[in-house]
Image (cartoon, grey):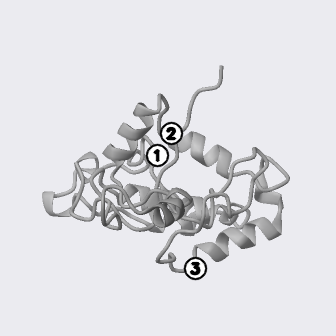
Amino acid sequence: MADAAYLHHWQVDVPPPEVATTVAQRPVTYVSWFAARAYCRWQQKRLPSTAEWEYVALASETAPDGHQDPAYQARLLEWYTLPAPAVPPLIGSGQKNYWGIYDLHGSMWEWVTDFQTAFGTGAARGDKESERDRFCGSGVFGVSEQERVNYPAFMRYAYRSSLRGTYTVHNLGFRCAKDLP
């Protein structure tokens, strides 16, 4: 249920206290979708859906819809131009958005429960078996100037569609969600 890099950065089951504190303050990475989902269930929570994640991630620091905030949009676009850091930043070190949620942008990619629902598979398009994993990523070029502010969302959808549930990488983590009463 995970590739060979699963928990790659964990050298021992129980790290020494000085390392454990640092590890506990960083996002969990090198974890598959299956492991992330299982952990959330163990916590009596779940992975957020793509729609939930995108809705919450749309908010800037001061508004539920950050499209009208040029500084916020510039920060998002800047993050997509930078390589992922070798060590993820500390949890809570990013900006808190309008909803009070930290680290949605600028830290890492995140698993969502329905990560591969944005694009159809090759079989759904009637492609040959050899072309099943290919899809058109140029859809962003047909959007209007006003919609181009959504480029980070296009990137997230494209990234999610390229994942398999067993993937474990250094810049892909998760967060748990729960339904409000």
Residue at 44% across / 37% down in the picture?
Answer: 40
Sequence order check, earlier mark of 3 and 2 = 2
Left or right of 138: which side holds 60?
right
- From this view, report whether residue 60 is shown above or below residue 149: above
Residue pointed to by mark 3 = 81
**Quarter where residue 34 is shown:** top left
Q: CA distance from mark 1 to mark 2?
A: 5 Å
The residue that disc 2 covers is 49
Q: Which residue position is annotated with label 1?
A: 112
Secondary structure under the numbered disc 1 in the rendered image: loop
**How would you rate the neighbour count of disc 3 (Cα within 10 Å): few for under 14, some for 14-19, many for 20 or more?**
few
- Who comes first in sequence, dot 3 or dot 1? 3
Percent coordinates x, y for residue 157 in the rendering: 48, 56
Residue 104 position (above or below residue 113)? below
Of residues 149 and 105, the one nearer the viewer is: 105
For the point 47% across and 66% down, which residue is it?
A: 19
Three-letter residue code for mark 1: Val
Spatial CA span between label 3 and label 1 = 22 Å
Is disc 3 in contact with disc 2, using a CB cutoff of under 8 Å?
A: no
**Residue count near mark 2 (Cα–Cα under 10 Å), binned few <14, some 14–19, many ≥20:** some
Tell which circle, 1 or 2, labels the residue nearer the N-terminal end: 2
Q: Is residue 61 visible?
A: yes
What residue lies at 83% left-to-right and 50% top-to-bottom? 63
Contact between marks 1 and 2 (CB within 8 A): the answer is yes
| Marks 3/2: CA–CA distance | 25 Å
